[in-house]
Image (cartoon, helix red, strand yellow):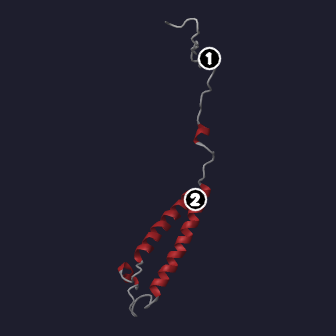
Amino acid sequence: MVSILALVHVVLSVFLVILVLIQDPKGGGAGGMFGGGGGSNSLFGATGAPSFLAKVTRGVAVIFAASCIAMTIFIKPKSDSVLDSMNVPAATESKIEAAPQQETVAPSEESSPE
């Protein structure tokens, strides 16, 4: 199931990139191949290509977003943390040695150097 969804996701992403590259907001560019140039003899008509390509791009983008959400749901990790799957040896008290503490002696009044 996940591999089919991943394949559909890749195909949608390539198709979405192609659709975005075909469009040009100024009317020129690669969209002229398919009738985006604006002539009455074009494939989609004088004003049909930009709106048609925009609608198709919008639809493919919505399907792409849905496939992103579906892949996130299906491929979420089973555990909460990477550390849940690691074997960490427990520390024992015999291995832990306390650091020796030094006592500080306050100088007394009787032993003051003269």
Name the residue tied to disc 2.
71
Q: Nearer the viewer, residue 4 or 44?
A: 44
Element assignment for label 1: loop
Name the residue tied to disc 1.
94
Residues at marks 1 and 2, CA–CA distance in whole angstroms: 49 Å
Element assignment for label 2: helix
Residue at (59, 20) in percent of width and height: 96
Q: Quadrant of residue 97?
A: top right
Amino acid carrying mark 2 in the image: Met
Answer with mark 1 or mark 2, whichever residue precedes in sequence.
Answer: 2
Q: Quadrant of residue 83?
A: top right
Question: Residue 55, how many percent across, how many down?
Answer: 52, 80
Q: Nearer the viewer, residue 98 or 72?
A: 98
Amino acid carrying mark 1 in the image: Ser
Look at the picture and state if 104 lies above or below 15. Answer: above
CA neighbours of label 2 inside 10 A, class few (<14), some (14 to 19), many (20+): some
Look at the picture and state if 90 lies above or below 74. Answer: above
Viewer-nearest of discs 1 and 2: 1
